[in-house]
Amino acid sequence: MRSIPKPDLEHARALAAGAGLPAIELMDERTLLALMLKRASLPTNPHRLAGDLLDRFGALAAVVAADASELARTPGLDVAAVADLKLLRQVCVHLIRSDVGARPSISSWTALLAYVRGALAHEPREQFRVLYLDRRNILMREEHRADGTVDHAPVYVREVVRRALELSASAMILVHNHPSGDPTPSRADIEMTRRVIEAARVFDIQVHDHVVVGREGEQSFRALGLI
């Protein structure tokens, strides 16, 4: 386990006591990232390394969402620091997910959108996920149903519906990302959604929405009149 240098340990104790929090809230992305990297005791200047990462990936969210293999190719970043960044990513996703799980997804739509943005907006490859809901529209399970390339994730309609039956789900919300950044649904997205809706209808399972997420925002099929 990596030890914390004495000055950083003192800083950590001050933060734990509530000191210095306003200053942290005012920090920009580069400063926050540099502070994290400084704790890793890397030989590279943390501010310069933070700038290199932000220049390469574009934003802090994109840095922590990047593939570990991509991060590892950054000069000066070691395996332990990459692991810290990936851990930060998972902590953030779990924090925003906690607002979604305890309330009906339809009535907590803002929290749901915040979650899917945080989970998928900066993913470098396309992913397709399904949120399975009970009859009260409470989230039962979120499942990762397909991984893809930079512009396509293969979705098997039969598997999506079969899983809903296994869970005794009453409804679903489909979610996927566009790594290009533009969340506008494609023809393929619309056709796939239609096939899922038709297959689910046979078993009296509703598809409440299909949300497409990108760095530029998100698009709801229901809001667009596509469902």
Image (spheres, rainbow, N blue to C red):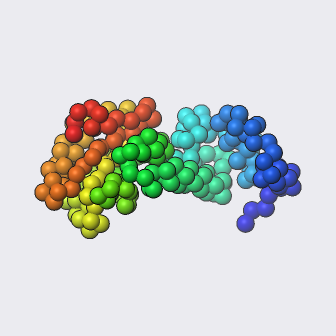
Residues 224 and 40: in front is 224
The image quadrant where one finds the N terminus is bottom right
* Residue appearing at x 34%, y 35% in the figure: 219
The image quadrant where one finds the C terminus is top left
Would residue 72 be visible to someone looking at this image? no
Residues 126 and 202: in front is 202
In the rendered image, which quarter is residue 187 located in? top left
On the image, the x and y values in percent for residue 169 come to: 28, 61
On the image, the x and y values in percent for residue 56 come to: 57, 36
Would residue 79 be visible to someone looking at this image? yes
On the image, the x and y values in percent for residue 185 come to: 28, 35
* Residue appearing at x 55%, y 52% in the figure: 95
* Residue appearing at x 85%, y 52% in the figure: 10
* Residue appearing at x 18%, y 42% in the figure: 191
175 with respect to 22 (left or right) = left
123 with respect to 52 (left or right) = left
Q: Is residue 101 above or below residue 208?
A: below
63 with respect to 42 (left or right) = left
On the image, the x and y values in percent for residue 138 come to: 37, 56
How many labels were placed on the picture?
Answer: 0
55 with respect to 183 (left or right) = right
Residues 79 and 6: in front is 6
In the rendered image, which quarter is residue 150 located in? top left
